[in-house]
Amino acid sequence: MKTVHILNGPNLNLLGKRQPEIYGRETLADVEAACARVAEQFGFGIRLMQSNAEHQIIEWIHAAREEAAGIIINPGAYTHTSIAILDALNTFEGPVLEVHISNIHKRESFRHHSYVSMRADGVIAGCGVEGYALATRRMGSLIGGQKA
């Protein structure tokens, strides 16, 4: 069975607790459950991971080269700062979708630039945690999943 890695960056372990007026009250466990339901419809599995450490996210991207059909990534603040994550994503041959819970273009100006977008095959921003399920659905189309 194909697998899609869903990678989450810093502070997303606090989803549901940190700034709920921006990020909502759902947790990463809720996100994982929603994405798993969508993936099942398309006949693939997911592996959701979160780290506050840039190097760990890079290691997961490297591992995805051998293990994953696609990557969905919310790099958190690393979106705006990490050329290293961009470089790692550029080594991955499958589709990459970038997700942001908030609309980064309506926030502080430093959040308007994304290094990850330079590699992403699509970007979903401002749809709340539903953006992850939307990205999972899109990934199903990109990796050739068959909707059940």
Image (cartoon, rainbow, N blue to C red):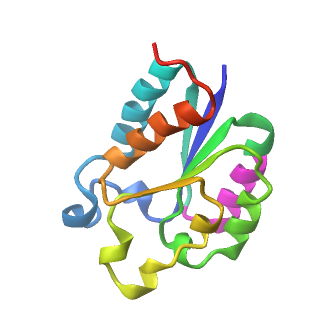
Quarter of the rendering occupied by the N terminus:
top right
Span shown in magenta: 52-63
On screen, residue 97 above or below 83: above
Look at 75% across and 67% down and name the residue there: 87
Look at 54% across and 64% down and name the residue there: 52
Viewer-side residue, 10 vs 141: 141
Image quadrant in which you'd find residue 89: bottom right
On screen, residue 2 above or below 99: above
Please say whether residue 56 is one of the residues in the magenta stretch.
yes
Viewer-side residue, 22 vs 116: 116
Residue 77: image location, x then y, percent: 49, 72
Number of disc labels: 0
Residue 124: image location, x then y, percent: 42, 55
Image quadrant in which you'd find residue 58: bottom right
Horizontal side of residue 53 vs 125, given as left or right:
right
Residue 72: image location, x then y, percent: 55, 47
Give the residue at the far bottom of this rendering: 109
Horizontal side of residue 80 vs 59, given as left or right:
left
Quarter of the rendering occupied by the C terminus:
top left
Horizontal side of residue 2 vs 130, given as left or right:
right
On screen, residue 83 above or below 99: below
Please say whether residue 31 is one of the residues in the magenta stretch.
no
On screen, residue 69 above or below 76: above
Look at 32% across and 64% down and name the residue there: 102
Give the residue at the far left of this rendering: 21
Look at 53% across and 77% down and name the residue there: 80
Question: Which secondary structure type mostly characterizes the magenta part of the structure?
Answer: helix
